[in-house]
Image: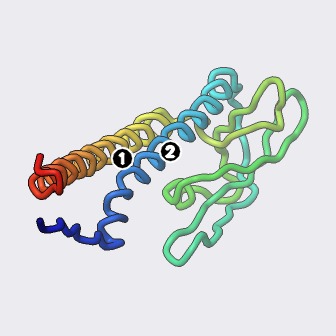
Amino acid sequence: MGKVQRKKKSSGVFLAQIFPFFMFFCALYGLIYRSLQIADAFPFHASSIPCQGIVTQLHRTRAGDTSDRYSVSFRYTAAGSVYEGSSAITWQEMQALGEGDVIPVYFSPDNPQNCQAFSPFHFWRHCFLALSMGFVRLFFAIGGMCLVLSNLKKTSSEAFCLNKENSVYGF
């Protein structure tokens, strides 16, 4: 009776098999993280009070070889006191602003130092794009997991058939 020789799987095949599972957990983590960010931003947006702020300084920070981060410092008056704050802004907002410009500022009535320039909650940016991209990642990760699991099931059933035909006991 001949022995069945199994082919050794290369590490590349093993990595290809675990990659969808890794992507699944990354996508799930991203969805949970983004959902928590939205949950934190929404109450501030619902209770924030709008006012006018004056741009005091624009900041551009290197964030790597190809990207930069932009922020604006501003001064605003809330509850009779003058406060200073800063917020992250987009490149387009940076190009449109200059020192001394008036911008909308939103602050918390409970803590006027807690503030945000422009709109504190962008539905398009915070909810739709972030969550839809998370669901797309999750969809592809689950699809990849299904492919890997169906391939593993097929290979294990083929190995079982080979072992059955070449078994020592003749079953």
Q: Quadrant of the N terminus?
A: bottom left
Q: Which residue is mark 2?
A: 30
Q: Which residue is mark 1?
A: 137
What colour-coding does the image apply? rainbow
Q: Position of residue 84 (x, y in %)?
A: 82, 47
Residue situated in front as seen by the camera: 143 or 134: 143
Horizontal relation, residue 156 to residue 43: left or right? left
Query: Mark 1 belongs to which amino acid?
Result: Arg
Circle 2: element type: helix
Q: Position of residue 154 (x, y in %)?
A: 17, 49
Residue 53 circle label: none
Residue situated in front as seen by the camera: 92 or 27: 27
Query: Mark 2 belongs to which amino acid?
Result: Gly
Horizontal relation, residue 21 to residue 4: left or right? right
**Residue at the location (71% across, 25% down)?**
49
Do residues under tags 1 and 2 come within 8 Å of each other at their CB atoms?
A: yes
Residue lying furthest front in this view? 169
Q: Position of residue 145 (x, y in %)?
A: 31, 47
**Residue at the location (18% across, 50% down)?**
160
Asked if residue 170 is positioned above or below residue 95 in the image, the reply reads above
Asked if residue 87 is positioned above or below residue 91 in the image, the reply reads above
Alpha carbons under labels 1 and 2: distance apart: 9 Å
**Residue at the location (59% across, 52% down)?**
89
Circle 1: element type: helix
Residue situated in front as seen by the camera: 58 or 40: 40
Image quadrant in which you'd find residue 134: top left
Disc 2 crowd, CA 10 A, few/some/many (<14, 14-19, 20+): some
Residue lying furthest top in this view? 47
